[in-house]
Amino acid sequence: MLYLVAPAGQGRDVYATLYAQKMFFLVTLQPRGALFEVIPYMDARHYAEKHLNLCRRDAPEELDGWQQLFKQTFI
């Protein structure tokens, strides 16, 4: 099972495994399914930090939820 860590833009999202939270995937939705790419911890964290910065600027009402998810996942 996977859970959403952060949107990555351009139709992509970062997911982590529910049981082994140190495995991250960049998932790209395509017309005929989804493409899964394993990415390193630091890349996943970079996408999540980038998303937090966007929320601070564009969607402050969503920031608390994303910050809590970031802390649970990366700290």
Image: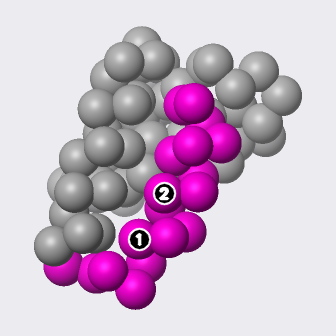
Image coordinates for residue 12, horizontal then vertical, percent: 33, 49
> Height in image: 52 above or below 43?
below
Q: Are the residues at dot 1 and dot 2 in contact (C-beta closer than 8 Å)?
A: yes
**In the orientation shown, which residue stands out farthest toward the top?**
40
**Residue at horizontal 54 percent and vertical 31 percent from the top:** 74
Q: Whole-Å distance between the Cαs marked 1 and 2?
A: 6 Å
Q: Quadrant of the C terminus?
A: top right
Find disc 1 in the rendering and name its residue: 63
Find disc 2 in the rendering and name its residue: 67
Q: Is residue 50 left or right of residue 66?
A: left
| Quarter of image, res 41 | top left
Q: Is residue 49 left or right of residue 66?
A: left
Q: Is residue 68 left or right of residue 64?
A: right
Q: In the image, what residue type sits under mark 2?
A: Gln
Image coordinates for residue 66, horizontal then vertical, percent: 49, 61
Q: Quadrant of the N terminus?
A: top right
